Structure formats: C-alpha cells, structure tokens
Amino acid sequence: MYSGTTDSEADGFSPRIVAFFCNWCTYTAADLAGTSRKTYAPNVRVVRLMCSGRIDPQFILKAFNQGADGVLIGGCHPGDCHYKEGNFKALKRSMLLQRMLEDLGIDGKRLRLEWISASEGEKVQRVINNMVSDLTQLGPLTLFPGTDGSFEGALQEASPMEHQMEVEQ
Ligand code: FES
C-alpha cells in the first residue's frame, strides 16, 4: 500500500509516471499485481511493448516533454529476454539517457530501469510506490528550453554529439 506524506504532497503535487513494460515479463507482473489485489499508486500510465529493447530514446524524451515527471522501464531479467539481448540494449540506452538528462540538470532518478519477471507482482507494487515517493520528493519536472525554444534543442545543446549517437545504437 502506498503511504507517506511529503512537502510536495502537502502542496498537492502528484507525480505522473509513464511506464514502458515488456509484454513477456513486467507487463504480466503488473497484471498479476492487479489480480492479486496488490495496490500501487495510481500515478502510472503503462505502455506495453514486446521487449524493453524496443524502447526508442525518443519515446522517453517525448514522455518527459509531454508532462511526465518520471519514466519507468520494466524488462525481463538478464538472460531471460525473449529476443536475446533486447534488455541489454535497454540498459545501455537508459544509462546514456540518464547522463544526457543530468547534463540538463534533470535528476537521474526520474528515469528508472527495473528487471521484473512475470511472477514478481509484488516487485511492481514496490517499485512504483518507491518511484512515486522519490518523484514526490523531487517535485514537478521543469524543463528549460534550448535557444530554439524546445526541450529537444536544449538536449542537443547540453549533450555531446557522441551521447546522441550512442543512444541511437
Ligand atoms: S522480451 Fe522482455 S526485455 Fe526483451
């Protein structure tokens, strides 16, 4: 059960989270959490993908750009990916994106990757509640536009080109 009050909560802030879940593991675990009546904070909107490796960095940046305070990626445990190494690609991309976000002054805790198997409904509950708590402490995400007035522009200005190329791989 989600509980606890912080200054941000007292101010009425409730973080918005976009979650990208792999169909074969974390999405099934989220379903299991629901059928097992494991309550988690209602702040999350889940997007189902066939594999965490399908996540394009643009999906994450778009989520932030359109109002998400945090993005959660859920994938199969290492060695369990149905497409062999999709989850390793997701790990690499998320680490690079965290660096790029931090270049913009955005706390890396706003992007989180977790390995959650289909049987770990309790972990879905715990991770979501924990992330809501972290984001509530951080407060709403504020994006500062680049000189062209866009978040994408700020990202390009703040991040060395090699970051972008690595993320795209
Ligand atoms: S199939 Fe689940 S992370 Fe690849």
Image (cartoon, rainbow, N blue to C red):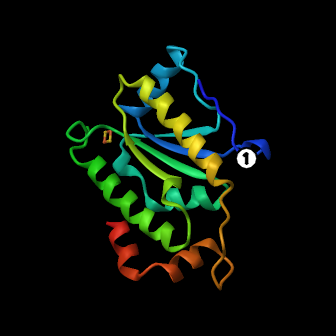
Image coordinates of residue 10 in percent, x first then y, are 78, 42
Q: In the rendered picture of this protein, how many numbered marks are placed on residues?
A: 1
Q: Residue at x 69, y 42 (%)?
A: 6
Identified at 53% across, 54% down, the residue is 110
User: Quick check: 66 above or below 27?
Assistant: below
Q: Is residue 39 left or right of residue 54?
A: right
Q: Assess mark 1: CB under 8 A from ligand 1?
A: no
Identify whether 42 is placed above or below 7. Answer: above
Identified at 35% across, 79% down, the residue is 162
Position of residue 73 measured from the top left corner of the image (x, y, whole percent): 44, 46
Residue, far bottom: 147
Residue at far top of view: 36
- 127 vs 61, nearest the viewer: 127
Name above or below for residue 65 compared with residue 11: below
Q: Nearer the viewer, residue 16 or 4?
A: 4
The image quarter in which residue 153 lies? bottom right
Q: Quadrant of ligand 1?
A: top left
For the N terminus, the quadrant is top right
- The image quadrant where one finds the C terminus is bottom left
Residue lying at the far right in this picture: please name it: 11
Q: Amino acid at mark 1?
A: Asp
Locate residue 66, reporting x and y percent.
66, 58
Q: Which residue is mark 1?
A: 7
Which structural element holds mark 1? helix
Q: Is residue 40 left or right of residue 32?
A: right
| Horizontal and vertical percent position of residue 17 | 59, 45
The crowd level at tag 1 (other Cα within 10 Å; few <14, some 14-19, many 20+) is few
Q: Residue at x 23, y 48 (%)?
A: 85
